Amino acid sequence: MQLRLADLRSHLAQRLARLYVIHGDEPLFAIEAADAIRAAARRAGFDEREIFIVEQHFRWDAFTASNANLGLFGARKLIDVRIPSGKPGPEGGEALERHARNQDADVLTLVTLPRIDRATQGSAWFTALITAGVSINVQPIERQALPGWIAERLGRNEQRVSRATLAFLAERCEGNLLAARQEIDKLALLLPKGELEVSSQTKNKYFRGTWNGGARLEVGFYAKEGGKAQIAVQVNKLAKRSDVDRERAAWKAALLKLQKLLEA
């Protein structure tokens, strides 16, 4: 069964297959899809987990034995198989094919692969996996779609930025979604909920812009001794005096959250 990445969460909310195959060349989407499947497995009671990373000289008999043995005290088990090369070899191909044919109700298998070539797509083992399970192909998004993707991700944090800022973030990330997510995560940690438009910035030093449609925002980053750093936030031209306490509380909460994360 082929499943679009966009439909994965609704699929997991309705049912949980016993075999999932993630393949493609977008690392962030592969990570997020695997995380979502593992989380759904935990909720469904698959409390044990075994991870197999298939590299040179990998012993497939260990994988076969794991599938044959029940979990501790009959617990449900997640088998997490990662094949970075996309090539399991003859022995591995046979093991995966047998595994696909003989699924256990108490075992959920997650197989993660990179982008695979046409020959591999027609192989017996890959055909067996995607026939018996759910296949999710994770591909990069088009460059012109990246600003919209960033906007959607920011919206999950109840944050908004201007089109110019979206274009700037997309240009800075150069199509690297992992890097884009890092920038989004930094904004989520540093900024309260609201709308930001960046007017100027110097990397790792400061940025300036407007906040929530009119207030002037300046954020500076200063290196200190002992590997420490200081962040200074200044918000000017607020519309009403009553906005001062609200903004002060929001920024204080955001900076405390960032401090706790860095000190953890």
Image: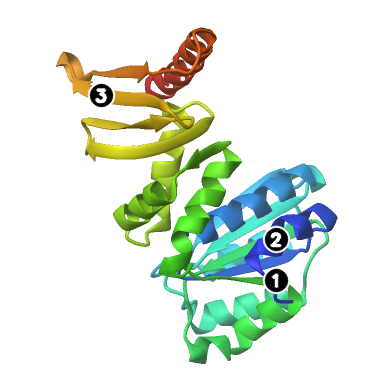
Residue drawn at 36 percent across, 18 percent down: 236
* Position in image of residue 59 (x %, y %): 49, 67
Q: Nearer the viewer, residue 243 or 232?
A: 243
Q: Nearer the viewer, residue 239 or 262?
A: 239
Q: Quadrant of residue 133?
A: bottom right
When the figure is inspected, residue 150 is found, relative to residue 119, above or below; the finding is above
Res 26 visible? no
Q: Give the spatial CA distance, label 2 vs label 1.
A: 7 Å
Helix or strand or loop: what does disc 2 sit on?
A: helix
Q: What number is the disc on residue 8?
A: 2
Q: Earlier in the sequence, mark 1 or mark 3?
A: 1
The local crowd at label 3, few if under 14, some if 14 to 19, many if 20 or more residues have their Cα within 10 Å, is some
From the image, state whether disc 1 or disc 3 is nearer to you.
3
From the image, state whether disc 2 or disc 3 is nearer to you.
3
Q: Nearer the viewer, residue 12 or 4?
A: 4
The residue indicated by pointer 1 is 3
Q: Amino acid at mark 2?
A: Leu
* Position in image of residue 174 (x %, y %): 32, 60
Q: Quadrant of residue 262?
A: top left
Q: Please state, as top left, top right, bottom left or bottom right, where the N terminus lies in the image.
A: bottom right
The residue indicated by pointer 3 is 220
